């Protein structure tokens, strides 16, 4: 009976050691998963920073070229305004003279559809 009780005791100890090893393996697995998650997050952050930097570089190139285009358009607009103002100042007197001549130069004539009744 003692040998049987000793066998049961050894079996319980072996079961306890197996249970401890299983718990230890679960802890290592959890620790490794946590470490893998942290590494993945670090890689994601690094990739995100790299893509963000590339985006900002492209954005600055595009925005820079847009500001250049905007500046050129503004410059062309100002040039056109000056050209139109010069043309206006140049032709203004001639147009006013023509208008005054048309208004003031009256030639009374009888309309061709006018009939005299006698």
Image: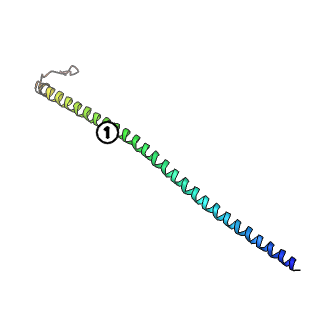
Q: Residues within 10 Å of mark 1 (few under 14, many from 20)?
A: few
Image coordinates of residue 110 in percent, x first then y, are 16, 21
Residue 8 placement: quadrant: bottom right
Q: Is residue 6 visible?
A: yes
Q: Is residue 85 above or below residue 18?
A: above
Q: Is residue 77 left or right of residue 39?
A: left
Nearer the observer, 60 or 33: 33
Q: Name the residue under label 1.
A: 67
Nearer the observer, 109 or 23: 23
Image coordinates of residue 9 in percent, x first then y, are 80, 76
- What residue is at 73 percent from the left and 69 percent from the top? 17
Q: Is residue 95 visible?
A: no
- What residue is at 87 percent from the left and 77 percent from the top? 3
Q: What is the quadrant of the C terminus in the image?
A: top left
Residue 62 placement: quadrant: top left
Q: Is residue 67 above or below residue 22?
A: above
Q: Going by the picture, which residue comes out furthest to the front?
A: 3
């Amino acid at each position: 009976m003692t040998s049987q009780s000793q066998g049961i005791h050894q079996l319980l100890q072996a079961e306890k050691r197996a249970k401890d090893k299983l718990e230890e393996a679960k802890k290592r697995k959890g620790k490794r998963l946590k470490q893998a998650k942290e590494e993945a997050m670090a890689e994601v952050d690094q990739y995100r920073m790299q893509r963000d930097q590339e985006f900002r570089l492209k954005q600055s190139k595009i925005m820079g070229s847009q500001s250049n285009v905007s500046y050129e358009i503004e410059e062309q607009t100002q040039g056109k305004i000056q050209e139109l103002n010069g043309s206006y100042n140049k032709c203004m007197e001639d147009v006013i003279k023509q208008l005054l001549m048309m208004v003031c130069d009256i030639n009374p004539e009888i309309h061709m559809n006018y009939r005299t009744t006698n």
